[in-house]
Amino acid sequence: MDNARRLQYLEAMGIDVWIPKIVMQPAQSSLLAIESNSIENPVQCVEPDFQDAENWDALQTEVATCIKCSLCETRNRTVFGSGNKNADWMLIGEAPGQNEDLQGKPFVGSAGLLLTEMVRAIGLAREEIFITNIVKCRPPGNRNPKPDEIESCGDYLQRQRMLIKPKIILAVGRVAAQTLLKTDEPLAKLRGKVHSLENTPVVVVYHPAYLLRSLLDKRKAWMDLQLAVHTYKNVEG
Ligand code: URA
């Protein structure tokens, strides 16, 4: 990604970037260092092995035909998740909204656009990562998913995690963070730290729908993303 493009993404996130008069050498810029993993050099998407492919198909069919909770009565489409099935990065949001319910894809509304910009700002393309939600069907009126709905969908998410084996998980927003980390702590206490879910590091980030309303927290969101990049680099070794 060229520098001008990156600055555009950061600007869209409300992040001011200080540009020194002396032009930095790429190696001196930590932001540019992140670009070593940039979308111009996308991670090779390796096809899952045969067994995994069968498991993926079975799981996708189960989700598409799920009637485990009452959300199946009001949904238009299930939203399984999308992206690279061998992703190092797995992003987990809360639940599909109206656009997602109509299109069957996660994060395609205005919050999705911002999420896409957020990941691009750290040098990743959507196709490189896997994005899904805690629950796979839209709660009516975009209310928070209820505990029994989260419970019913838990097995699907667990199996997705087992198949993808991500190196890092981003919990996007409070509901995702509290569900994955099995805690009632507020998001403010959960962000800014590296948690662990069965030995996979979990970094909590603000939900983009919240960031669209709260300009002031966009800077903190950028710090969270940098923590995630730093954590990923450590895991990768
Ligand atoms: N919000 C979410 O948490 N997930 C989506 O897929 C869309 C909006």
Image (cartoon, helix red, strand yellow):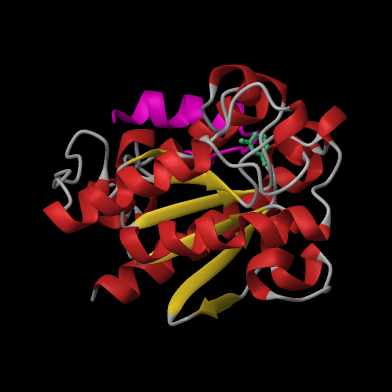
Left or right? Give the position of 6 relative to 111: left
The location of residue 142, given as percent across then percent down, is: 82, 33
Which quadrant does the N terminus fall into?
Answer: top left
Against 191, is 211 above or below? above
Q: Is-magenta flag for residue 8?
A: yes
Left or right? Give the position of 179 relative to 202: right
- Residue in view at x 81 percent, y 60 percent: 147
Which quarter of the picture shows residue 30?
Answer: bottom left
Against 24, is 237 above or below? below
Number of disc labels: 0
Q: Nearer the viewer, residue 236 or 96?
A: 96
The location of residue 203, given as percent across then percent down, is: 56, 66
Which quadrant does the C terminus fall into?
Answer: bottom left
Taking the image in four quarters, ligand 1 sits in the one at: top right
Residue 34 in view here? yes
Residue 166 in view here? no
Q: Is-magenta flag for residue 232?
A: no
The location of residue 17, given as percent across then percent down, is: 54, 39
Which quarter of the picture shows residue 213?
Answer: top right
State the extent of the magenta-drawn residues as a range.
1-20
Left or right? Give the position of 47 relative to 71: left
Against 26, is 100 above or below? above
